[in-house]
Amino acid sequence: MSSREAVVHRYMDGFRRSDHGAILDCLTDDVRWCIHGLRTTNGKVEFDDEIENPAFEGSPELAVERTIDAGDVIVVTGTGTGHHREAGRFRFAYNDVFTFREDLIAQVDSYVVGLGSG
């Protein structure tokens, strides 16, 4: 596993525990997070606010199915389960593209597809 893959896996583990510090330690100060079709955050403060979006409860369950290392870019695909405060439990598939600057994540492009409840 490359050092950048290790950073991505620490980031994912941070989300599983809603550990803001662990997640933010993986990011550049000017990080950009684009959740395509939903929202874009700029900088650590906005990113931190999105870690535990008030529309959701608890930490997500995230399964990493594939990690692809392409140098400055790491791609992770997987599935997960979350709990929306109004709609309840839901499943999703995701693809996150992490762009690095040095040894920190400078941009995250997230693509999320709902798989229904359950």
Image (spheres, grey):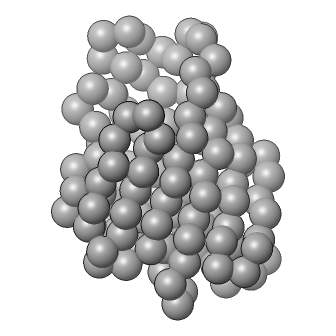
x, y percentage for residue 57?
Answer: 33, 28
With respect to residue 43, does 79 lie above or below? above
Is residue 61 visible in the rendered image? The answer is no
Tell me what residue is drawn at x 27 percent, y 61 percent: 42
> Looking at the image, which residue sits at the far bottom?
102
Tell me what residue is drawn at x 30 percent, y 74 percent: 30
x, y percentage for residue 61?
Answer: 56, 36
- Quadrant location of the C terminus in the rendered image: top right
x, y percentage for residue 116?
Answer: 59, 11
> Looking at the image, which residue sits at the far front?
37
- Quadrant location of the N terminus in the rendered image: bottom right
With respect to residue 51, does 101 lie above or below? below
Depth order, front residue of 100/62: 100
Tell me what residue is drawn at x 41 percent, y 11 percent: 88
x, y percentage for residue 83?
Answer: 42, 22
Give the side of residue 107 with respect to residue 43, left or right: right
With respect to residue 108, does 65 lie above or below? above
Tell me what residue is drawn at x 38 percent, y 9 percent: 87
* Rendered image quadrant of residue 76: bottom right
Is residue 85 visible in the rendered image? The answer is yes
With respect to residue 92, does 106 lie above or below? below
Count of numbered labels shown in the rendering: 0
* Rendered image quadrant of residue 43: bottom left
